[in-house]
C-alpha cells in the first residue's frame, strides 16, 4: 500500500480530476486526503478518524470519481450522511470535482425535498447517490434506488449518524450492497457503535487518524463570559461591534431560542438569519447559501440544523447556550478558525456552569480564558488586556510563527 503523498501529481489522477482540483484552488493534499486517497484507489476499506474542516469530501470524492464506469448505468457509489445540509454540501463539492467529467451523474436525495423531484433525478441513472439514511431507504423500498452494483459505500460523520439513531438504517443500506463492496467510514470520534459497524462490514480496513495539529489545527481563541438571561444579547452585540466581527455563528440549544434571538437581533438592525429544524428545506438552502455568499452577517442556529455548513471565514462563534454534549462544543467552535484563518469562540456561562466548563476544557484539552466588561466599558482578559487588542496580537503571533 502506498505511503502518504505530498503532491496531487503523485497520485497519477486523471487529467479531468487534476484540472478540477487545480480550479478549486487545491495545491497539495491535506493530511486526510494524502492518507485516504491511495488506499481507496487500491480498493481497500478505510476507517478514518478526522476532525471537521480537514478536506474529507475530497478525500473520498476523488477516488469515487476515478473508479466510476460511465458506461454502467447502475448506482456505483453511495455516500450516506446524517443531515440534509451535509448531503447538499457533499453533492456540491463532488460536482465541482466532476466539473470536467460531464458523463458522470451525481444525485442527492434527502428528506424535506419533494419526492417527485428525486424520482425524476433517479430515473436519469445516476452513478453516485448522496443521501440521508431515511430517504435512501424510502427509495430502496420504492425500487427507485438499487444498490446491487455499488462498488463503494461511504459513511460520512458516522459517529453523528449512529448517535442520531440511524444504526438500523445504516445496516439495512449496507446489507443491500454486494458483499465485496468497499466500505469507507469517516468519523470525528471512533465510538463503540462505529467500531461495531466497522467490524461487521469492513475487511482488513486501513485505519487512519488525522489529528488537528499544525496548519490543520483550527486557530481558535476560546473565551468564557459570565452572562445570562437577557444580558447575553447585549453582551454579544457589544463584543461583535468592539471586535469588528463580520461573519458570526450563534448556537442555541432550542428552536424557540433561535427564533426569539433572531427576531431581537433583527429589531436591533443587525443583518441576521436563522436555521432550525422547523424551517422548510427550500428556505434552509437559501439561508445557507446566503451565509456562504455574505448576504447577512449573523447566523443563529441549532446544532443539527447547522451540520454541513462549511464556511472558511467565520470570524467568531458564540455559544448562547452551553451545549449538552462535549462533542457539540467541538463541532460548534470548529466553524471558525478554518483555512489558516484565526477565529474566536465565546461561551456565555453562569457560576453554576463552572463544573460544566471544566469538563469541556478537560475534554478538548484547551484553555477557555475568562473575559469580562470592565469599568472602562471594554471587554478585557483577567490580566487587563483589551480583547480586541488581544485578538490582533494573537493573530500576529501565529502569523510570525507560521501557524
Image (cartoon, rainbow, N blue to C red):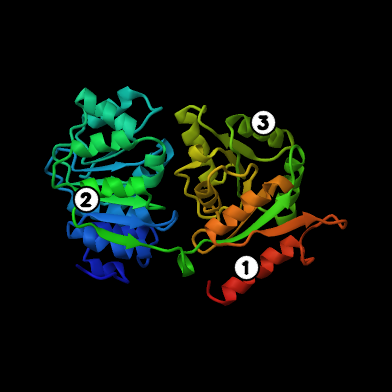
* Residue that appears at 30% across and 28% down: 118
Location of mark 3 (residue): 260
Quarter of the image that includes the N terminus: bottom left
Cα separation, mark 3 vs mark 2, equals 46 Å
Cα separation, mark 1 vs mark 2, equals 43 Å
Tag 1: Cα neighbours inside 10 Å, few (<14), some, or many (≥20)? some
* Residue that appears at 39% across and 57% down: 50
Location of mark 2 (residue): 202
* Residue that appears at 67% across and 47% down: 353
Left or right relative to 180: residue 59 = right
**Residue 306 percent coordinates (x, y):** 50, 41
Left or right relative to 172: residue 293 = right
Foreground label between 1 and 2: 2
Cα separation, mark 1 vs mark 3, equals 34 Å
Lower position in the chain sequence, tag 3 or tag 2? 2
Lower position in the chain sequence, tag 1 or tag 3? 3
Look at the numbered disc 3 and give the secondary structure of its residue: helix
Residue 136 lies in what quarter of the image? top left
Lower position in the chain sequence, tag 1 or tag 2? 2
Amino acid at each position: 500500500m502506498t505511503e502518504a503523498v505530498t503532491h496531487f501529481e503523485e497520485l497519477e489522477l486523471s487529467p479531468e480530476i487534476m484540472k478540477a482540483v487545480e480550479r478549486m484552488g487545491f495545491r497539495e493534499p491535506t493530511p486526510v486526503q494524502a492518507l485516504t486517497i491511495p488506499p481507496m484507489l487500491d480498493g481497500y476499506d478505510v476507517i478514518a478518524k478526522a476532525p471537521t474542516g480537514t478536506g474529507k469530501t475530497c478525500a473520498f470524492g476523488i477516488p469515487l470519481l476515478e473508479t466510476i464506469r460511465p458506461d454502467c448505468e447502475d448506482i456505483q457509489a453511495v455516500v450516506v450522511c446524517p443531515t440534509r445540509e451535509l448531503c447538499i454540501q457533499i453533492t456540491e463539492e463532488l460536482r465541482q470535482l466532476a466539473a470536467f467529467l460531464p458523463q458522470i451523474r451525481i444525485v442527492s436525495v434527502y428528506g424535506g425535498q419533494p419526492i417527485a423531484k428525486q424520482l425524476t433525478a433517479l430515473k436519469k441513472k445516476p452513478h453516485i447517490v448522496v443521501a440521508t439514511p431515511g430517504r435512501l431507504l424510502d427509495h430502496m423500498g420504492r425500487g427507485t434506488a438499487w444498490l446491487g452494483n455499488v462498488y463503494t459505500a461511504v459513511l460520512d460523520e458516522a459517529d453523528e449518524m449512529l448517535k442520531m439513531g440511524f444504526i438500523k438504517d445504516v445496516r439495512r443500506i449496507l446489507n443491500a450492497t454486494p458483499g465485496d463492496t468497499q466500505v469507507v467510514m469517516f468519523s470525528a470520534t471512533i465510538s463503540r457503535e462505529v467500531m461495531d459497524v466497522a467490524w461487521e462490514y469492513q475487511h482488513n480496513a486501513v485505519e487512519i487518524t488525522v489529528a488537528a495539529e499544525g496548519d490543520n489545527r483550527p486557530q481558535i481563541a476560546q473565551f468564557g463570559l459570565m452572562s445570562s438571561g437577557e444580558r447575553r444579547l447585549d453582551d454579544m452585540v457589544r463584543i461583535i461591534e468592539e471586535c469588528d466581527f463580520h461573519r458570526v455563528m450563534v448556537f442555541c440549544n432550542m428552536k424557540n431560542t433561535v427564533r426569539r434571538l433572531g427576531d431581537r437581533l433583527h429589531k436591533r438592525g443587525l443583518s441576521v438569519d436563522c436555521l432550525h429544524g422547523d424551517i422548510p428545506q427550500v428556505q434552509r438552502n437559501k439561508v445557507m447559501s446566503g451565509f456562504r455568499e455574505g448576504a447577512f452577517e449573523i447566523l443563529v442556529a441549532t446544532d443539527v440544523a447547522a451540520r454541513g455548513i462549511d464556511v472558511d471565514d467565520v470570524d467568531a462563534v458564540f455559544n448562547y447556550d452551553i451545549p449538552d454534549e462535549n462533542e457539540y462544543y467541538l463541532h460548534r467552535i470548529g466553524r471558525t478558525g478554518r483555512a489558516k484563518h484565526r477565529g474566536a469562540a465565546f461561551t456565555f456561562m453562569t457560576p453554576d456552569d463552572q463544573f460544566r466548563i471544566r469538563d469541556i476544557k478537560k475534554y478538548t484539552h484547551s484553555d477557555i480564558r475568562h473575559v469580562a466588561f470592565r469599568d472602562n466599558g471594554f471587554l478585557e482578559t483577567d490580566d487587563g488586556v483589551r480583547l480586541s487588542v488581544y485578538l490582533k496580537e494573537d493573530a500576529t503571533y501565529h502569523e510570525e510563527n507560521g501557524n
